[in-house]
Amino acid sequence: MLSSVLISFAATLAVNVGQTAPVFSLSTYKGGTFNLAQQQGKVVVLFFLGCT
Amino acid sequence: MVEDSIMQKFNGGDVAVAGIDIWNSSDAEIDSFITATGATFPIAKNGASTGNAYGVIANSMVVIDQNGVVRFVQQLGTSTVTFSQMRQTVGGAAATMRGLLSSGAVDRRISAHPALLDPSSTVTCQDLTILSRFGHFFDWKVKM
């Protein structure tokens, strides 16, 4: 029950198709940086995950 | 065909794939994840705020086109997606993969999951999660 509430809440806030993707720049594991703004011209697939 | 138009757009394999850890895991936890899944894509660390900006939970996928516009959002584990739906999006990941696959631009082992080759098939998000967990869905071997 709680989880379904959380999921619907998250789904409501998710970015919409057609919207400009929020830019970000993050350090990557084992060095380097992933800067979305530098990916212009490429199709970008982002996989949001949690490492446990 | 949709695949043809996608292939023309993506000719040259200009696809970037990245994981974003939205749980701000430690290096040791990320290392364990990579070991467990065989993931080869770069994993961006400390992505909790980025996850919030995109409004997504863990095990979600977002595809962004060449101009920085969101073209596909999948909150894995919350709904069912059909590949025919995904093929309708220019940046749909499955469509991209299918197109690249047919062109020989990606590693053939992606074809291990039969659902990816059947455009009429319906896969559950659980299937997609399994695929991504094992790196097959995202482990594109694009020939540059």
Image: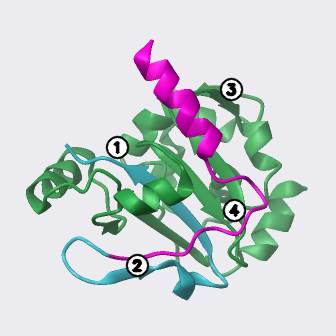
Chain colours: A cyan, B green
Q: Give the secondary structure at mark 1.
A: loop
Q: Distance between the residues labelled 3 and 4?
A: 23 Å
Of residues B1 and B24, the one drawn nearer to the viewer in this rendering: B24
**Residue drawn at the location 28% of the way across and 50% of the way down:** B23
Residue A23 in magenta? yes
Amino acid type, residue under disc 1 in the picture = Phe
Label 1, residues with CA under 10 Å away: few <14, some 14-19, many ≥20: some
Question: Dot 2 corresponds to which residue?
Answer: A34
Chain letter behind tag 3: B
Residue B129 in magenta? no
Amino acid type, residue under disc 3 in the picture = Thr
Question: Dot 1 corresponds to which residue?
Answer: B134
Residue B68: where, in percent of width, then height?
Answer: 68, 75
Chain letter behind tag 4: B
Chain letter behind tag 2: A
Residue B117: where, in percent of width, then height?
Answer: 66, 40
Residue B13 shown left or right of residue B38 in the figure? right
Q: Which mark is residue B122?
A: 3
